[in-house]
Image (cartoon, rainbow, N blue to C red):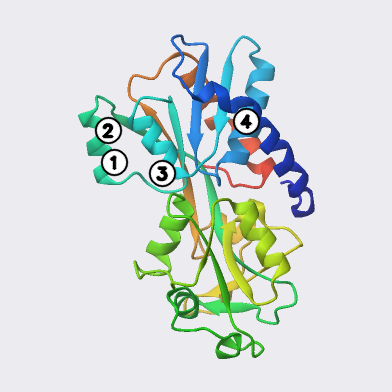
């Protein structure tokens, strides 16, 4: 697993790679030697890393990768612009129906496991929250850290934008479909969440496990049986309450490099890459 303190360097590299690959995502290729994959920013680091390794082994094949959020990737798949959508949530029934109406039958692939970790500033003395407290913070019924065992300081809640699969998952699993508090600060990318929380003593955010660094502090979550910290062990055995699968969605008529790349990521070698970059294998 890549150590947390090394992730900022990795993110810079991935941004450069995304910029390089992005023009290739504007039109669909007409052969089986090139593919385009787009979507979840959570799945992006894994896919960039895997694509680089895959192309080193297959120099005649091209895998172009871009982020933008799960909803963006799924919409591009539905519109026939890409071969694979990355998503940190399941496709909705309405999205599947829309895809089929446009002649696209999505096929689901679980490619890795991840955990959504709740982060605060390192100077925050709070070490854990119950899921009810976390829900209260994000729906606005709890607005001061002193109400959950911390100092007398206003809570600044950071969230992702609504196109993010992590946003959708968090709203479903934590808020139980409550609305986010109106003063929540929305960020378009995970890196922005980390930066804001690292600089604001009163802030709280949520990110994928692989993005956690020593610039922020992760909180344990309590479902009623005691606090559970997000660790590889608790995420892999689903003891941690916000462990989740990560997805690729391809077309049912996928062929060529698309099939080869998905098979590569699901192979033992590909799953070793999953572990190396900080996610968890699909057994």
The CA span between labels 2 and 1 is: 6 Å
Whether residue 28 is situated above or below residue 209 in the rendered picture:
above
- Tag 1 near tag 4, CB within 8 Å: no
Residue at disc 4, secondary structure: helix
The CA span between labels 2 and 4 is: 27 Å
Q: Nearer the viewer, mark 4 or mark 3?
A: 3
Q: Position of residue 67 (x, y in %)?
A: 54, 38
Q: Nearer the viewer, mark 2 or mark 4?
A: 2
- Label 3: few (<14), some or many (≥20) within 10 Å? many
- Tag 3 near tag 1, CB within 8 Å: no
Q: Residue furthest front?
A: 183
Closer to the N terminus: mark 4 or mark 3?
4
| Residue occupying the point 49% across, 77% down | 137
Determine which residue is flagged by label 2: 99
- Tag 3 near tag 2, CB within 8 Å: no
Q: Position of residue 229 (x, y in %)?
A: 62, 69
Residue at disc 3, secondary structure: helix
Determine which residue is flagged by label 3: 71
Q: Position of residue 168 (x, y in %)?
A: 41, 56
The CA span between labels 3 and 1 is: 10 Å
Foreground residue, 196 or 114?
A: 196
- Tag 2 near tag 1, CB within 8 Å: yes
Closer to the N terminus: mark 3 or mark 2?
3
The CA span between labels 4 and 3 is: 22 Å
- Tag 4 near tag 3, CB within 8 Å: no
Q: Which mark is residue 50?
A: 4
Foreground residue, 247 or 140?
A: 140
Q: Quadrant of residue 275?
A: top right
Foreground residue, 38 or 128?
A: 38
Residue at disc 2, secondary structure: helix
Closer to the N terminus: mark 2 or mark 4?
4
Q: Quadrant of residue 30?
A: top left
């Amino acid at each position: 697993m890549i150590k947390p303190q090394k992730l900022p360097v990795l993110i810079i590299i991935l941004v450069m790679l995304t910029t390089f690959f992005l023009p290739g995502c504007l039109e669909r290729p007409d052969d089986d030697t090139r593919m385009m994959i787009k979507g979840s920013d959570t799945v992006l680091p894994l896919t960039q890393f895997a694509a680089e390794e895959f192309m080193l082994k297959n120099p005649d094949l091209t895998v172009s990768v871009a982020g933008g959020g799960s909803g963006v990737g799924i919409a591009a798949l539905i519109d026939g612009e890409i071969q694979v959508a990355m998503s940190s949530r399941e496709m909705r029934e309405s999205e599947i129906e829309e895809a089929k109406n446009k002649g696209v039958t999505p096929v689901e692939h679980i490619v890795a496991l991840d955990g959504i970790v709740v982060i605060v500033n390192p100077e925050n003395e709070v070490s854990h929250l119950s899921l009810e407290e976390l829900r209260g913070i994000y729906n606005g019924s709890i607005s001061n850290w002193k109400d959950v065992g911390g100092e007398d300081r206003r809570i600044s809640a950071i969230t992702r934008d609504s196109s993010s699969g992590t946003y959708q998952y968090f709203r479903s699993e934590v808020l139980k479909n409550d609305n986010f508090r109106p003063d929540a600060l929305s960020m378009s990318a995970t890196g922005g969440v980390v930066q804001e929380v690292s600089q604001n003593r009163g802030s709280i955010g949520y990110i994928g496990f692989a993005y956690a660094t020593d610039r922020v502090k992760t909180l344990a979550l309590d479902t009623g049986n005691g606090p559970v910290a997000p660790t590889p062990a608790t995420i892999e055995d689903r003891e941690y309450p916000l462990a989740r699968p990560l997805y690729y969605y391809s077309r049912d008529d996928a062929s060529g490099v698309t099939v080869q790349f998905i098979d590569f990521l699901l192979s033992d070698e590909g799953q070793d890459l999953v572990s190396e970059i900080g996610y968890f294998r699909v057994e």
